[in-house]
Amino acid sequence: MTAYRRNPLIFVWALLTVVTIASWQTARDGGEAHLNATVTVVVLSIAALKTQLVIWHFMEVRHAPTWLKVTTNGWLLALFGLLFGFYFAAL
């Protein structure tokens, strides 16, 4: 049983669960009928964090060659940069 507690993936999974609940709570509390930029920024930032954690820990990119680390980080920055850009351009 203690081997499960020492596994870093269990910690990351628990963190992802807590962050998902925080994201849901943020969206629920701030989700009025109109668009709320603060809520959107917080929820998208949490999604970016979750994506980074999944890529690094569950896809094992943290042990991958440098080119793959750079590529996945660049993809993540480009994706969320575009999401933020499209959102703020639509305001």
Image (cartoon, rainbow, N blue to C red):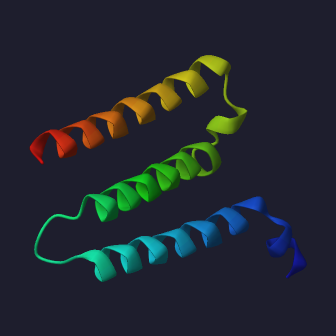
Expressed as whole percent of the image width and height from the top left, the position of residue 60 reads 64, 42
Residue 79: name its quadrant: top left
Between 1 and 24, the one lying in front of the other is 24
Residue at 43%, 33% in the rendered image: 77
| Most distant residue in the top direction | 67
| Quadrant placement of the N terminus | bottom right
Expressed as whole percent of the image width and height from the top left, the position of residue 31 reads 23, 76
Expressed as whole percent of the image width and height from the top left, the position of residue 64 reads 67, 29
Q: Is residue 31 left or right of residue 8?
A: left
Residue at 70%, 61% in the rendered image: 9
Residue at 66%, 20% in the rendered image: 66
Above or below 53: residue 89: above
Residue 26: name its quadrant: bottom left
Expressed as whole percent of the image width and height from the top left, the position of residue 8 reads 76, 60
Q: Is residue 91 left or right of residue 68?
A: left
Residue at 52%, 31% in the rendered image: 73
Above or below 2: residue 55: above
Number of numbered discs overlaid on the protein picture: 0
Above or below 34: residue 80: above
Between 9 and 52, the one lying in front of the other is 52
| Most distant residue in the right direction | 2
Q: Is residue 72 left or right of residue 91?
A: right
